[in-house]
């Protein structure tokens, strides 16, 4: 091959790389523009969009889960004592399918129970199958719009504590002191 032929081939291959780059950039710009125009309506039609009702739950929905509105970052009065020893029981990971606007949404969470009496918490560990069953039923009754917010998550945690103590027949002296969601995913 002569030097002229090699130079001509290099120019041709360089030109094709530029063409591919231009086509790629144009495709990205067209896709971005189409997504900006049709993205939200399409997501809303599929039940996947975020609208005002997803961002803020109805006041009626939130009030159904809790009678009193305690501060979110304070321990529950008379239940959690930081100066006492704590013993934990693992309820484990739960996956709940929830209907939401014609689609199925999921709540995946891991639940831990804490108490102050070692002997009592060991007996709670024996009741984990009953607790899991009761919590699955309880979580299935919740509204996705509510549990998908931070406030809804905290209300759910407090109601979960109440539900767990009901399931195990807790008394004022022997009870689970608090519930932790060590993993919490809504999608």
Image (cartoon, rainbow, N blue to C red):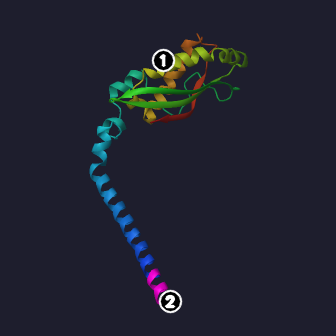
**Residue behind mark 2:** 2
Q: Please tell me which residue is depicted at 56% across the width and 13% down the height of the picture.
A: 167
Q: Identify the element where label 2 is drawn.
A: loop
In-image side of 16 versus 108 (left or right) = left
Q: Is residue 13 magenta?
A: no
In this rendering, does residue 128 appear at all? yes
Q: Please tell me which residue is depicted at 32% across the width and 38% down the height of the picture.
A: 46
Q: How far from the left and from the top, in percent, is residue 125?
A: 67, 18
Q: How far from the left and from the top, in percent, is residue 147?
A: 43, 30
Q: Identify the element where label 1 is drawn.
A: helix
Residue span colored magenta: 1-9
Location of residue 78 by image quarter: top right
Of residues 76 and 89, the one nearer the viewer is 89
Q: Please tell me which residue is depicted at 41% across the width and 73% down the height of the picture.
A: 16
Q: Is residue 28 above or below residue 14?
A: above
Q: How far from the left and from the top, in percent, is residue 171?
A: 60, 11
Q: Earlier in the sequence, mark 1 or mark 2?
A: 2
Location of residue 100 by image quarter: top left
* Magenta span: chief secondary structure: helix
Give the CA distance from mark 1 to mark 2. Answer: 80 Å
**Residue behind mark 1:** 137
Residue lying furthest front: 1
Looking at the rendered structure, which numbered label has been put on residue 126?
Answer: none
Of residues 165 and 171, the one nearer the viewer is 165
In-image side of 175 versus 2 (left or right) = right
In-image side of 43 versus 174 (left or right) = left
Location of residue 19 by image quarter: bottom left
Q: Please tell me which residue is depicted at 56% across the width and 15% down the height of the picture.
A: 165
Residue lying furthest right: 119
In this rendering, does residue 70 appear at all? no
Q: How far from the left and from the top, in percent, is residue 54?
A: 35, 36
């Amino acid at each position: 091959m002569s030097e002229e032929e090699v130079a001509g081939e290099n120019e041709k291959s360089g030109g094709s790389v530029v063409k591919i780059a231009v086509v790629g950039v144009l495709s990205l710009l067209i896709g971005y523009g189409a997504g900006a125009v049709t993205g939200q309506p399409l997501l809303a039609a599929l039940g996947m969009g975020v609208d005002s009702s997803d961002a803020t739950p109805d006041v009626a929905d939130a009030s159904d889960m809790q009678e009193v509105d305690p501060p979110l970052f304070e321990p529950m009065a008379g239940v959690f004592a930081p100066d006492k020893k704590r013993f934990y029981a693992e309820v484990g990971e739960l996956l709940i399918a929830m209907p939401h606007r014609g689609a199925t949404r999921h709540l995946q969470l891991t639940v831990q129970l804490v108490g102050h009496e070692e002997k009592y918490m060991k007996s709670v560990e024996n009741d984990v199958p009953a607790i899991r069953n009761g919590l699955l039923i309880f979580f299935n009754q919740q509204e996705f719009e509510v549990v998908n917010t931070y406030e809804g998550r905290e209300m759910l945690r407090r109601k979960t504590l109440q539900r767990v103590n009901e399931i195990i027949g807790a008394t004022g002296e022997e009870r689970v002191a608090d519930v932790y969601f060590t993993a919490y995913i809504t999608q």
